Structure formats: structure tokens, C-alpha cells
Image (cartoon, rainbow, N blue to C red):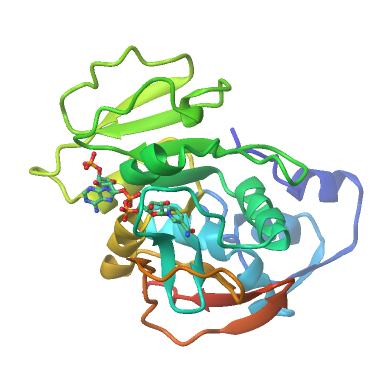
Amino acid sequence: MYGKTPPCTNLILSSQIPKVIVSCIDPSPGVNGKGIEVLRAGGVDVRSGLLQQEGEELIRARRIFVQAKRPYVVLKWAETQHGLMAPAENVRYWISSAYSRRLTHRLRMEADAILIGAATALKDDPELNNRYYFGKSPVKAVISLNTELPASLNLFQGGTPTLYIHSSKRPSIGLPPGVTCVSIDPEKEELIPAVLAQLASRNIGIVLAEGGAQTLNSFIRLGLWDEAWVFQSKTAFIQDGLPAPRIPVPCAREETLGADRLLYYRNRIPA
Ligand SMILES: NC(=O)c1ccc[n+]([C@@H]2O[C@H](COP(=O)([O-])OP(=O)(O)OC[C@H]3O[C@@H](n4cnc5c(N)ncnc54)[C@H](OP(=O)(O)O)[C@@H]3O)[C@@H](O)[C@H]2O)c1
């Protein structure tokens, strides 16, 4: 039995590869160094620890999933240079540039699920899929504990598996095909850890939380996030509106992206 990909150990042995250099050890249960033992027992010269830091970087999301038993959480939003993420009035407003949008869709492709809150689902009515980058569209998830979302919303269309996270009462709308109701009772369990546990139980290893502010802030408040991508527009102008979240760690990297600045943040790996 194995997960998404078969172990390479048997292939290495049958191909009689004499020497293998390992960067870091896969922490997955049932793996965790066992492949190295098998290879050594089969006469292969195995060295480990080369470029270990770079290797750890590559398996960062996997390590969180295995050790913290939750998906790797990527936060993403767009804000004006004055730190607002939506205008006060009830209108849709694009803050970031076409370059940023393309990169956002790459982040969607790399994620196993995209998550938003009920207010964003209602106000922005996003399709929540990957249209501007190649590759797959992830599972969609919406937290809407008390709001009855209309079945006509874009996020419920298209047949992509969608999780409607609701309070213990089942939503009364007829759920469209592909939409599954996930019940969470916030009086019995803390919402965000319960949401992450539900996602992990569905083998979702990376979740991209796209907003709005309440949803993003609830991850930040609990320290349950791993990366944040903030697209800061130099040109968008909103006078009065919804304050964007603030990240409690210094920015790790800053880039220019068309008319935007990309601010990239990293949280420390939980102990
Ligand atoms: N600039 C950007 O990148 C960006 C991205 C996304 C959205 N937005 C904007 O953000 C605005 C919406 O943001 P928002 O902060 O008002 O709302 P939101 O986070 O989109 O949704 C809030 C709702 O989600 C549920 N929810 C999420 N987290 C929860 C928690 N920890 N505890 C309880 N319920 C939780 C609740 O639904 P129930 O009330 O049903 O329980 C809550 O009312 C819109 O104007 C949208 O245009 C901007």
C-alpha cells in the first residue's frame, strides 16, 4: 500500500543504481528512513544530508501535514498601499494587476483547496477556480456557518468538489452536484482547527485561504498559517473600506510585479 506515488526504493534496486544521495528524510509514517535501510540492505551506497536545508524547504508542506496533522496554510490577499482590501460600499473592485492575478491562479493550481468566508462568497461571487494558469483547479471550500448561501453562486457551479462548511444544521438549499455539507458546531469545537481537521481528513495537504478579512484574521490570530502572499497595489485607490489583515512577522521577501508589490511572509514551522 502507498499514497499518491509509489516508493522509488524498488525501482532503484531493480535498476541496480549503485549510489544514492539523499537530501532529507521523508517524515511520512511508514517511510521515515525505511527506504534508506532497504537500499543499504540491498547493497546500495546511500549518503544523506546533502543540501539538507534546501530539501527541507521542498518538503515543508508535507512535514506540516504529517507532523502537525493539518494542511499547510497559505494566506493570500490584495490590498491598496494604504492597507485596505475592499471599498466600504457594496461594489466589486479589482485591486491587483493582471500579473498578480496570474500568479494567484498558480497558487490555486498548487493548492489542494481554496477557502473563503461567506461574505466574500456573497459579495464577490468568485468562481474560485484556476483559469489563468495551466494545471488543475482545487477543491473549493466556504465557511458559512449561519448564512444560507444561494445555490446560484458561481462557486457552486462547474462540478468541482466543493465543501460547504456550515453549523450543525444542514443548509436548507438543495446542494448542487459536487457540493458536500461539512457540519461544524462552533459551540463544541474551535472553528478554524475544526475546519483544518476536516480538510486534512479529506487528504487536503495545502489550503489557500483567500479572504475576506475575518477569515484570514482568524488564521493569523491562532498562528495557524505558514505563508502569506500579499499583493499590494501602487495604483488602486480606495478612500474608505475594509482594513486588510496585518501579519505579525517581518516580510521575508519583496518583489515588484507589474504595478503591484508582492510581499511574502513566512511563519515559523510549529515545534
Ligand atoms: N482584496 C482581497 O484580496 C479580498 C479577498 C477576498 C475578499 N475580499 C473582500 O472582503 C470582504 C469580505 O470580508 P469579510 O471580512 O467581511 O468576510 P469573510 O471573511 O469573507 O466572511 C466572513 C464570514 O465567514 C464565516 N467565517 C469566516 N471565518 C469565521 C470565523 N473565524 N468565525 C466565525 N465565522 C467565520 C462567517 O459566516 P457566517 O456569518 O455565515 O457564519 C462570517 O460571517 C468583501 O468586501 C470582499 O470583497 C477582498
- Image quarter hosting the N terminus: top right
Q: Position of residue 145 (x, y in %)?
A: 22, 37
Going by the image, does 246 lie left or right of 108? left
Residue 159 in the image: state x and y as whole percent. 56, 20
Q: 228 or 69, which lies in front?
A: 228
Q: Image height check: is 89 above or below 55?
A: above
Q: How many numbered tags mark residues here?
A: 0
Answer left or right for 80 relative to 104. Answer: left
Task: Please report the residue visible at 37 percent of the width from the left and 76 percent of the height from the top.
Answer: 246
Q: Is 262 rendered above or below residue 76?
A: below
Q: Report if residue 222 is visible in the image.
A: yes
Please say if 175 is above or below 101. Answer: above
Report which quarter residue 112 is drawn in: top right
Is residue 231 left or right of 68 when viewed as pictured? right
Residue placed farthest to the left in the image? 187
Residue 88 lies, with reference to residue 183, above or below; the image says below
Q: Residue at x 38, y 72 (%)?
A: 270
Residue shown at the point (49%, 42%) measured from the top left: 204
The residue nearer to you, when weighing 134 against 235, is 235
